[in-house]
Amino acid sequence: MKLTVDTQELNAVLAVASKALSAKSTVSILEGIYMAAENGELLLRCTDMSLQIEATIGASVEKGGACVLPGRLFADLARKLPGEETSFTLEKSSMLVESGRATTTMQTENAKDYISMPDVHREFSLTISKPALKNMIRQSIFATAQDDSKPILRGVLLELEDDILSMVALDGYRLARRKERVKVTGEFRNSVLPSRGLLEISRILDDNDEDINLVFSKTHVMIDMGCTRIITRLMDGEFIRYRQILPTGHTTRIRANRQELMDSIDRVSLMAREGKKNHIKFSFEEKTLTITANSEIGNSREVIAIDRVGNDLDIAFNAKYFSDVLKVLDDEYVTLEMNSNISPCVVAPENGSEYYYLILPVRLFTAS
Amino acid sequence: MKLTVDTQELNAVLAVASKALSAKSTVSILEGIYMAAENGELLLRCTDMSLQIEATIGASVEKGGACVLPGRLFADLARKLPGEETSFTLEKSSMLVESGRATTTMQTENAKDYISMPDVHREFSLTISKPALKNMIRQSIFATAQDDSKPILRGVLLELEDDILSMVALDGYRLARRKERVKVTGEFRNSVLPSRGLLEISRILDDNDEDINLVFSKTHVMIDMGCTRIITRLMDGEFIRYRQILPTGHTTRIRANRQELMDSIDRVSLMAREGKKNHIKFSFEEKTLTITANSEIGNSREVIAIDRVGNDLDIAFNAKYFSDVLKVLDDEYVTLEMNSNISPCVVAPENGSEYYYLILPVRLFTAS
């Protein structure tokens, strides 16, 4: 194995691929980076068996071959290589890396011992524009559960209705659903994608408006972006049947400026945080919303102008669950729909039906 | 107590003063921020009894007074206040803070219960330009000990010889000394300043070329920058008599490009890190320095051009102790002076005698 690559390109693809590197794996070879060179291309691959990322760059290959390099060392070294070009020469199990005045020899492992994820045999695929996919991920993923009490809730559900794909995430306190039209080839099946894999997908997607394909097998999903391929395992098990918890109507509907609401919650949260439970109270009146929080050391209060249809209502929330959703929306105005202070509140952009967020209130401790 | 201040100014001084705030103090009132208003000024003060920072801004004071506000809450809130102006109204023990549409009430504690550091009665003072003081701190403080095995080594020694002030820091493996001419008023005494206090002083110093005074009492040092005053305790106990460990001559002298040396050490360190002990080896020959590191998974090697007077020498160091000093120097070339691979190496800029750094070698494990 003997080849030369552009150092900057090497760096760029390694930064991408190493996102899937196992920091500390029970299978020590997965702490390595698989590299293979042939036909003028160098391929780099990392996986932790849940997520696999591989990337290809052009290389001047004198002699093809494959091996596994020490992951952390190689990834860190690549960032600092001084030469414009970097050459690799494998002799027996020792890889000589030369770049400018830096010379490094690394012990490699046998490429045959590397464990890659299985090929993805297409059952069905989805076609969607990159920015739309990125937005779907951004606006749903934050609502996934952060603990392992119900592992399936660390994933995002993909479901389909009339060529409209929904991504749904929930953690027992709130639910986020983002819809987008897609093109489906083959027979769609509901799938749950782990949040970590989705996050890496959204990071790798560039911002141009092209379409990309998500290719699903029974157990995996693969995205092929030409030079970069990313595979993630689908999660096992049934997602929660969430539709039964969605409210069917509302008695109070509010329209508020998203930025104003977000800023006020942000400030009032500081007092809520002192109160340990992070609860903030909303009092909706005809033209105003009063947001308050109390703690032993004081209380905060903000008033913002709103439009309201329906009844006066006092309702309390965990501040974080509210600010989380306001941060990922881009709209100038949002609506809040509620029935009572013990039933869920639905947050949505003023216009369109692509986005739906449901948040459970907390019990009010003080009489309103 | 009733006053109004500019919110941006409030923010700026709070950011400075809160650096001395006790995050979690055994004396709960020290988790608070002392504020006092009179004669058109608002003073804010924080201390953890080792470091005290106070800052003053202009205020429109309707009614003077003083109190102690909850520290973390007030500091965090100030950063987010929406109004251009912020008003404070104290009623009984409750402080009403109003800014734009944000209204917060905070429970205060009695100003009489606050514990400030004692006034600094001048024994002597030093006058030095701000940039010079900043540089002295930057180029010495990193060599202070990070653990508490010898508490005095967490401080920086100030000593004087013919109006030349030295700041000396050492941790048992390396020593840094930075000299600068100062004006002394009164009778100078060697003093040891805690690194934390020095760090905050250097952060607060702005970059203009004015002189400032360091006023020393027997137990404290105070810097008065007009609107900001910072006081830090001096450390008790005798500093290590370091002069006896400074080598008196050398048999090998090297001149190397600082940036080249730093970059090469940086890369070779990656391999040294894999070897756990972080050791790198220097081999000095007539025109070249070869830097190497070995570990189980490989080895790294870099060659840089140097000028040498004296003998060939193989010597090994902890990589971090070498890169630390190269980072804080600004000079294009540095010199290294050595006697043997078991005696200290002296690093200095090529020109001038203001800076002196000594680093102990580590034993070579492999035959050279």
Image (cartoon, coloured by chain):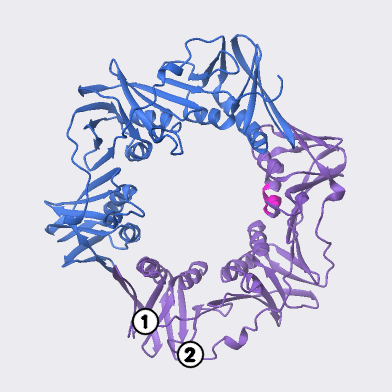
Chain colours: A blue, B purple
Query: Which badge, 2 or 1, comes first in the chain's sequence?
Result: 2
The amino acid type, in three-letter code, at marker 2 is His
| Nearer mark to the viewer, of 2 and 1 | 1
Chain letter, disc 1 residue = B
- Relative to A67, is A249 on the left or the right? right
x, y (%) of residue A34? 23, 54
Image height of B340 relative to A90, above or below = below
Report crowding for label 1: few under 14, some 14 to 19, many 20 or more residues within 10 A (C-alpha). few
Instruction: Tell me which amino acid carries mark 1.
Output: Phe
Name the residue beneath numbered marker 2: B250
| Quadrant where the N terminus of chain B is found in the figure | top right
Mark 2 belongs to chain: B
Question: Is A143 located above or below residue B122 in the figure?
Answer: above
Relative vertical location of residue A282 with respect to residue B21 in this rendering, above or below: above
Stretch of the chain drawn in magenta: B15-19
Q: For residue A120, which quarter of the picture?
A: top left
Disc marking residue B365: 1
Q: Is residue B106 visible?
A: yes
Residue at (46%, 25%) from the top-left corner?
A175
* Apparent side of residue A15 relative to residue B55 in the rendered image (left or right): left
